[in-house]
Image (tube, grey):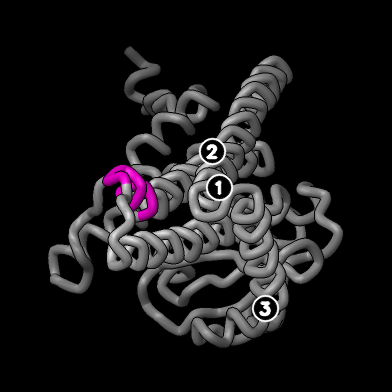
């Protein structure tokens, strides 16, 4: 058992280092895209303005409080007396994650299984839907909550807020560039065709990078969740159940078809399951067959 835990810990450390490197590389690519567009619009001054737009957007989004975001989603606070077992799970996992404060719990009224995290540090909050609480068992629910607390531990809300600000700034500066190209063309000035194409395509590139970053952070949160619970199978089972629910909704016509993986903020479930199994292969081994008294008698 001790060797198994040591092996899991070593795999988790290696995986986390890889995801941290990918996050830095994607941030660098996002920033480079923004600065390129700013440079094409106005040289060094354009770069400064582009970065200022991204900074101001980040500050505006940072002022949105977790309770405001939860109310916008229709979520209400979930008191400890309403779900004592769930609060115990959150308290235990928050302690293992060494969070400064236990995230507050909110309840979504919908019947569709869902969970998400908003806020940062001691202002973080986790929302779970009635459908999630009714669909998942305790082991699976623990895996989902651990995944959400992993986002809190890693500061993923902040990470994605900054990434979103870079995308917004790229789109804004790109639109300014397109307007400048149109005005120059109306005045009869020659404009290289590649310039408006760059202004038009850069926001799409930035959005693709943001979605890629989101998918990598989901993988990282899965890995951290396994470290918190020591149970990759519980989270994997929850992912399978949630995927079945989405399939049923698509079959009934309540949801659109599955988008291409590069247009999704979450990785394909199959890929997540494969990575969870690679982290803790022993958790996915079938249990030994039960032997009856007749078997022993033979």
Residue 61 falls within the magenta-colored stretch:
no
The correct choice, above or below, for 133 with respect to 68 in the image is above
Give the residue at x 50% y 82%: 73
Give the residue at x 59% y 45%: 31
Could you say which disc has been placed on residue 64 in the image?
A: 3
Image side of residue 101 versus residue 11, left or right: right
Decide which of tag 2 and tag 1 comes sooner along the chain. Answer: 2
- Helix, strand or loop under label 2: helix
Give the residue at x 73% y 51%: 153
The one of 27 and 47 positioned closer to us in this rendering: 47
What residue is disc 1 on?
39
Q: Nearer the viewer, mark 3 or mark 2?
A: 2
x and y percentages locating residue 190 in the rendered image = 30, 51
Q: Are marks 3 and 2 in contact (CB under 8 Å)?
A: no
x and y percentages locating residue 256 in the rendered image = 20, 65
Decide which of tag 1 and tag 3 comes sooner along the chain. Answer: 1
Q: Are marks 1 and 3 in contact (CB under 8 Å)?
A: no
Residue reaching furthest to the front: 188
Image quadrant holding the N terminus, namely top right
Image side of residue 275 versus residue 279, left or right: left
* Alpha carbon separation for disc pair 1 and 3: 31 Å
What residue is disc 2 on?
29
Image side of residue 68 versus residue 207, left or right: right
* Alpha carbon separation for disc pair 2 and 1: 15 Å
Residue 197 falls within the magenta-colored stretch:
yes
- Helix, strand or loop under label 1: helix
Q: Which residues are magenta?
A: 192-199
- Helix, strand or loop under label 3: loop
Picture quarter containing residue 131? bottom left
Give the residue at x 57% y 32%: 22
């Amino acid at each position: 058992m001790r060797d198994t835990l040591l092996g899991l810990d070593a795999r988790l450390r290696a995986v986390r280092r890889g995801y941290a490197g990918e996050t830095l590389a994607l941030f660098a690519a996002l920033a480079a895209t923004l600065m390129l567009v700013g440079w094409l619009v106005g040289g060094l001054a354009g770069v400064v303005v582009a970065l200022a737009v991204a900074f101001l957007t980040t500050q505006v989004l940072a002022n949105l409080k977790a309770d405001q975001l939860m109310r916008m989603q229709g979520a209400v606070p979930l008191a400890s007396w309403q779900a004592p077992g769930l609060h115990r799970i959150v308290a235990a996992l928050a302690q293992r994650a060494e969070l400064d404060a236990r995230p507050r719990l909110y309840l979504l009224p919908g019947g569709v299984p869902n969970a998400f995290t908003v806020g940062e540090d001691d202002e973080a909050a986790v929302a779970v839907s009635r459908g999630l609480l009714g669909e998942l068992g305790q082991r699976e629910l623990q895996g989902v909550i651990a995944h959400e607390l992993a986002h809190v531990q890693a500061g993923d809300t902040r990470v994605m807020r900054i990434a979103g600000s870079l995308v917004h700034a790229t789109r804004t500066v790109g639109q300014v560039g397109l307007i400048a190209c149109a005005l120059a063309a109306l005045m009869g000035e020659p404009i290289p065709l590649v310039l408006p194409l760059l202004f038009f395509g850069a926001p799409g590139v930035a959005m693709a990078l943001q979605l890629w970053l989101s998918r990598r952070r989901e993988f990282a949160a899965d890995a951290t969740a396994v470290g918190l619970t020591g149970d990759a199978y519980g989270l994997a089972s929850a992912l399978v159940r949630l995927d079945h629910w989405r399939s049923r909704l698509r079959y009934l016509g309540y949801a659109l078809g599955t988008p291409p993986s590069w247009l999704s903020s979450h990785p394909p479930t199959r890929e997540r399951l494969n990575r969870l199994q690679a982290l803790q292969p022993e958790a996915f081994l079938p249990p030994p067959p039960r032997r009856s008294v007749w078997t022993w008698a033979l």
